[in-house]
Image (cartoon, helix red, strand yellow):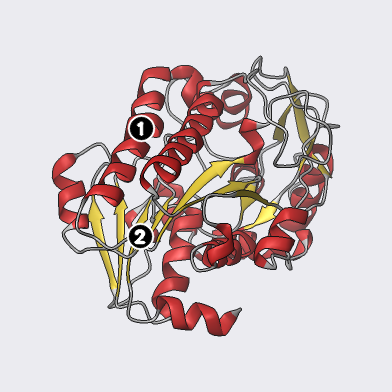
Amino acid sequence: MEADYTKAYKGATILVTGGAGAIGSNLTKALAELGAAKVIVLDNLSSAERWNVPSLPNILFVEGDILDEVKLKRVFFEEPQYIFHLAAFFANQNSVDHPEKDLQVNGMGTLRLLEYATFTKANIKRFVYASSGCSIYGSSAPMPLKEEFMSLHLSTPYQITKMLGELYCNFFHHHYGTPVVKTRFFNSYGPGEVPGQYRNVIPNFIYWALRKKALPITGTGEETRDFTYVTDIVSGLLKAGILENVIGDEFNLASEVETRIKDLAEMINKLTGNPAGINFQERRKWDTKSRLLASVDKARKLIDYEPTTGFEEGLKNTIKWFQDNWDNIEKSARFGPGASSAVKSVVGK
């Protein structure tokens, strides 16, 4: 597979929306190191930082929104051959607080990118859409989660609009032949994700643990998630961008390991030497999933996907990234007005 990466991406022009984020920055770095002629990062920095974009000569950073027609014309002027659409209005609580913005970015933004990819003179070889396996299966799906199960009973605007993005991808593929692939991420974590009010649990836990704060668990702690290390997701994305048999299809990118939130918190406290323990909080109303565990059987079959990073190893790598970038992280961490009670109960101390 590695040789195929080099063949496909060497000398190519590639657009990565949301390329300053955790997955996007790691993907951008990988593409640049694989010999891409130009990797264009389009990111409005609403939930990412400029310092997180790799400083390599074949990376072009364009600060802008996927809703901005001027910025879209700018990046498509470069005639990208591959598009990795990772930009999103992230995530569940943010969408509950700001549902219209969520619809604009995740719905209209995805539609516009598909239109530009389909109707401009750029010769698009692949449009890879970052969907969310944590979102679109709903709360009643049998475990492990498999691609053929779908639900209309979704509990947040973010879940609805990530599903909407998949449906738009289906339409453009069936109606116009746009070479789309839909990848469903599960609880990504790793170097590159700055903590904040609307960010994922692992960067927030590490941030609070390094500040010697109790880690807030919204629920009983028995809830489980399928935490997937960022480089495993990047590996899946790279393969999704080149293999012909995946066009028009969708598949999970996950670890296939179920981890209790309580165990996660205890592990992070141990690895960081945090004596503050755990602070249990009321579960958020929209959080209806007590378990998350994905099957990657389809990804194994289609793209030879195999997660390779163990959970403790991944946590250690992420903690080291926090320590190495602590000054920037402290300046960038966003816990503003409207934070959940769990966040305020810890950060406010």
Amino acid carrying label 2: it is: Trp
Image: 189 above or below 285: below
Q: Residues within 10 Å of mark 1 (few under 14, many from 20)?
A: many
Q: Which of marks 1 and 2 is nearer the N terminus?
A: 2
Residue drawn 51% across the image and 56% down it:
23
Q: Which is more toward the observer, 90 or 51? A: 90
Quick one: SS at disc 2? Answer: helix
Residue drawn 48% across the image and 26% down it:
94
Describe residue 69's horizontal placement relative to residue 303 as left or right.
Answer: left
Amino acid carrying label 1: it is: Val
Residue drawn 86% across the image and 32% down it:
222
Quick one: SS at disc 1? Answer: helix
Describe residue 64's horizontal placement relative to residue 320 as left or right.
Answer: left
Q: Measured from the top left, where is residue 79 in percent x and y?
A: 22, 63
Q: Can residue 240 be seen in this view?
A: yes
State the mark number for residue 105: 1
State the mark number for residue 51: 2
Q: Is residue 255 visible?
A: no
Give me the C-alpha separation between circle 1 and circle 2: 23 Å
Describe residue 29's horizontal placement relative to residue 255 as left or right.
Answer: left
Q: Measured from the top left, where is residue 194 in percent x and y?
A: 49, 49
